[in-house]
Image: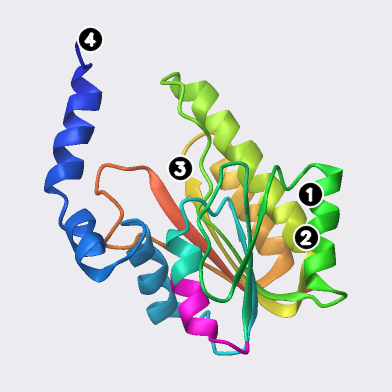
Amino acid sequence: MKRSKSSSRWLNEHVNDPYVKRAQKDGLRSRSSYKLIELNEKDRLIRPGMLIMDLGSAPGGWSQVAGKLVGEKGRVIATDILPMDPLDNVDFIQGDFTDDAVFQQLLDKLGGRQADLIVSDIAPNISGVAAADQAASMYLVELTLDMVRQVLKPGGNYAVKVFQGEGSDEFLKDVRTSFEKVVIRKPEASRPRSREVYLVGKGFKG
């Protein structure tokens, strides 16, 4: 089967990507780990002992970083429709977090507490149809914001990946209504031609 030009380009970029090589060397699950590391360095999101929720966590690049930073007194509650191998200080629930049964499992894990931080590097399965992919992506990030409004503690923080395009400006405005401050970040580990940016909401109004 002949590869398309775009998939060949992706494969070539991936093989030669310094962050992919660095992740392998550092024992990290994915190159995206460095995006959270950079966001954390800039915005001081994670502290020891925190309770964090990671939405769309597989293969675990962000949960791995967060689990190390919260330490044994903290906890990361991670969820994804795909399986994820175990990690220290991380509780993983497989399933769709918008499904009532999975949502209830997440609430059970919270045990009446509210999250200090909610992070999401979630992305839809890419179909190659730009408009459909953008709509699917915006739908997912809106679902993460809905979760934020239900389980994030007042004063808590939120970091989410957003693909710039149809609906992204409206989403930014919506996030701003719930947080004292919202900044837009483009971590160095984001590929330059990617439309992805990260919104960091600080000081949840509750």
Q: CA distance from mark 3 to mark 4?
A: 32 Å
Tell me the residue that label 1 is attached to.
Answer: 102
Q: Residue 158 occupies which quadrant of the picture?
A: bottom right
Residue 44 visible, this orientation: no
Q: Quadrant of the N terminus?
A: top left
Label located before the other in sequence (3 or 4): 4
Tell me the residue that label 2 is attached to.
Answer: 106
- Do residues under tags 1 and 2 come within 8 Å of each other at their CB atoms? yes
Residue 84 visible, this orientation: yes
Residue 177 pos. (x, y %) = 72, 62
Amino acid type of the residue that numbered disc 1 sits on in the rendered structure: Val
Answer above or below: position of 2 versus 133: above
Q: CA distance from mark 1 to mark 4?
A: 38 Å
Label located before the other in sequence (1 or 4): 4
**Residue at left 17%, top 41%?**
13
Label located before the other in sequence (4 or 2): 4
Q: Main secondary structure of the magenta part?
A: helix
Tell me the residue that label 4 is attached to.
Answer: 1
- Do residues under tags 3 and 2 come within 8 Å of each other at their CB atoms? no
Amino acid type of the residue that numbered disc 3 sits on in the rendered structure: Gln
Amino acid type of the residue that numbered disc 4 sits on in the rendered structure: Met
Q: CA distance from mark 4 to mark 2?
A: 42 Å
The stretch of residues the image draws in magenta is 65-73
**Residue at left 60%, top 39%?**
138
Say few, some or many: other residues with alpha carbon within 10 Å of mark 2 (under 14 / 14 to 19 / 20 or more). many
Q: CA distance from mark 3 to mark 2?
A: 29 Å
Mark 2 element type: helix
Residue 27 pos. (x, y %) = 29, 67
Q: CA distance from mark 1 to mark 3?
A: 29 Å
Residue 164 disc label: 3
**Residue at left 55%, top 37%?**
137
Answer above or below: position of 108 versus 55: below
